[in-house]
Image: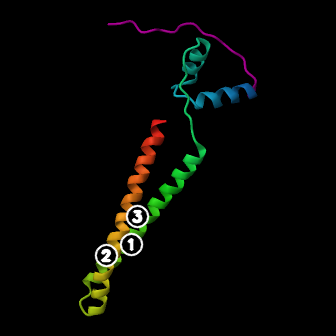
């Protein structure tokens, strides 16, 4: 069994509140699991991986995700209405309307699917950066 790298030595550093705030801000932008790992990496001049966030891309994705949810809700509501109309037996006009609107529903659902696919592509690209 290999021996772990046990850390028994302490280094105490005094910081002002402003310095601590800055340090935590920088640390939170990295992939380090804890502040000690970040501090060791900086002190020992090891590479630190930093998350890069593109705010405009984040805003775009947030809006698109909301749009996706809304489109799904509209599609579900539309589907429920059409299903209910199909169950009505007494009015042939309602049935014919429902049949004609199946085409519109299919177009709508195809468009929702395209939006979902594009969002997935953008999301995957965003995660790779």
Between disc 2 and disc 1, whose residue precedes? Answer: 1
31 vs 100, nearest the viewer: 100
Residue where numbered disc 1 is placed? 77
Q: CA distance from mark 3 to mark 1?
A: 9 Å
Quick one: quadrant of the N terminus?
top left
Residue 103's mark?
2
The crowd level at tag 3 (other Cα within 10 Å; few <14, some 14-19, many 20+) is: some
Q: Which label sits in the foreground, 3 or 2?
A: 2
Residue 7 lies within the magenta run: yes
Residue where numbered disc 3 is placed? 72
Q: CA distance from mark 3 to mark 2?
A: 17 Å
The spot of residue 10 in percent (x, y) is: 60, 9
Residue 115's mark?
none
Q: Main secondary structure of the magenta part?
A: loop
Is label 3 in a helix, a strand or a loop?
Answer: helix
> What residue do we see at 40% from left, 49% from top?
120
Is label 2 in a helix, a strand or a loop?
Answer: helix
* Residue 99 sits above or below residue 111 on the image: below
Query: How is the model colour-coded?
Result: rainbow
Q: Which label sits in the foreground, 2 or 1?
A: 2
Residue furthest to the left in view is: 89
Residue 31 lies within the magenta run: no
> What residue do we see at 30% from left, 80% from top?
84
Q: Which residues are magenta?
A: 1-17
The spot of residue 129 in percent (x, y) is: 49, 36
29 vs 5, nearest the viewer: 29
Between disc 3 and disc 2, whose residue precedes? Answer: 3
Between disc 3 and disc 1, whose residue precedes? Answer: 3
């Amino acid at each position: 069994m290999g021996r772990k790298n046990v850390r028994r030595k302490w280094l105490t550093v005094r910081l002002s509140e402003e310095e601590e705030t800055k340090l935590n801000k920088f640390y939170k932008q990295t992939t380090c699991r804890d502040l000690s790992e970040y501090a060791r990496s900086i002190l020992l001049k090891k590479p630190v991986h930093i998350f890069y966030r593109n705010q405009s891309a984040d805003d775009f994705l947030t809006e698109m995700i909301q749009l996706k949810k809304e489109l799904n809700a509209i599609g579900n509501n539309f589907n429920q209405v059409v299903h209910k109309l199909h169950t009505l037996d007494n009015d042939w006009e309602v049935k014919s309307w429902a049949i004609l609107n199946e085409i519109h529903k299919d177009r709508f659902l195809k468009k929702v699917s395209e939006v979902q696919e594009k969002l997935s592509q953008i999301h995957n690209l965003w995660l790779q950066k």
